[in-house]
Amino acid sequence: MKLRILGCAGGIGGREKLTTSLLLDDDILLDAGTGLSELDLAEMIRIDHVFITHAHIDHVVGLAFLLDSVLSKRSEPVTVHATPNVIATLQAHLFNWKLWPDFAAIPTAENAILRWSPMPFDSTLELQGRSLTSCEVNHTVEAAAYVVTNGERGFFFSGDMGSSPDVWKRLAAENRCDAVIVDCSFPDTEARIAGLSKHFCPQVLASEIAPMPYSTQFLITHLKPGEEENVMRELHAHDAKRLFKPLARGEIFSF
């Protein structure tokens, strides 16, 4: 599996410019933030599946533009996978003919470019040798993370999350999880804001991942603008043995 980082910013104006979106191989998108603007039209047309972690705008805004761009250029719909509640939120507040057209009815309801596919927590979907399992994580709205494997190797992608101790115990038993892509937005000096917004700060993240093997690489995403160096410095200070690395747009990983 090839994973390409299209966007990983926790806001605008910082070191990273585009919000969360990851391309798995050529046909699967993990979240649909402004990072989608990295793709040209031919690349967008090849996307068959989009897995959404939660409904916050920095993770879904690109989906609206993706569907608009590929309309009439694909013979099959783009399938969007998310929890039933996340789908209901997107239907009510984004694809509602007010903020954006309802692409589940365009060009017709029978032949729409958008197909919703509810994916409850703890369900698994197999797509051409790739397995994606949804698990619940703690955020201000309902949110999922995905464990993605090819049967031998894989990674964990959290979208946005705060303190979720049970997730790390579960992952520690997952012997095919080579890398963890996890939100660590705020420095420890902003621990209160991190807690209120249900994001990680270094102290909490370093403490919670104690069950994880030291061979696992932690790719840090959603760093808030201007806090990138502070967060990474504090992570290394809390646990110098961990493989902490800031995620960067344009990086490609193989699993």
Image: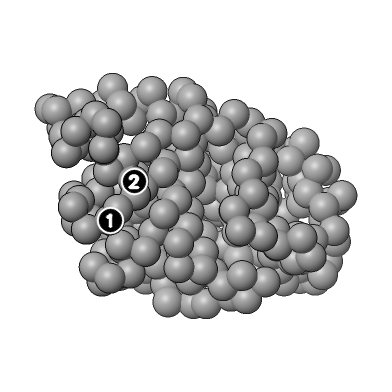
Q: Position of residue 171 (x, y in %)?
A: 78, 49
Q: Which residue is mark 2?
A: 77
Identity of the residue drawn at 27% across and 56% down: 74
Q: Position of residue 66 (x, y in %)?
A: 26, 53
- Give the residue type that dot 1 points to: Arg
Identity of the residue drawn at 24% across and 68% down: 41
Asked if residue 140 is positioned above or below residue 199 in the image, the reply reads above
The answer to whether the residues at label 2 and label 1 have Cβ atoms under 8 Å apart is yes
Asked if residue 172 is positioned above or below residue 90 in the image, the reply reads below
Identity of the residue drawn at 25% across and 49% down: 67
Are there few (<14), some (14-19), or many (20+) residues within 10 Å of tag 2? many
Asked if residue 139 is positioned above or below residue 250 in the image, the reply reads above
Q: Position of residue 228 (x, y in %)?
A: 47, 66
Front position in the image: 178 or 108: 108
The colouring scheme, among rainbow, by chain, secondary structure or one colour, is: one colour
Q: Is residue 153 left or right of residue 9?
A: right
Q: Is residue 160 left or right of residue 168?
A: left
Identity of the residue drawn at 80% across and 43% down: 170
Q: Which residue is mark 1?
A: 74
The Cα–Cα distance between marks 2 and 1, rounded to whole angstroms, is 7 Å
Q: Position of residue 55 (x, y in %)?
A: 39, 35
Front position in the image: 234 or 163: 163
Image quadrant for the C terminus?
bottom right
Image quadrant for the N terminus?
bottom right
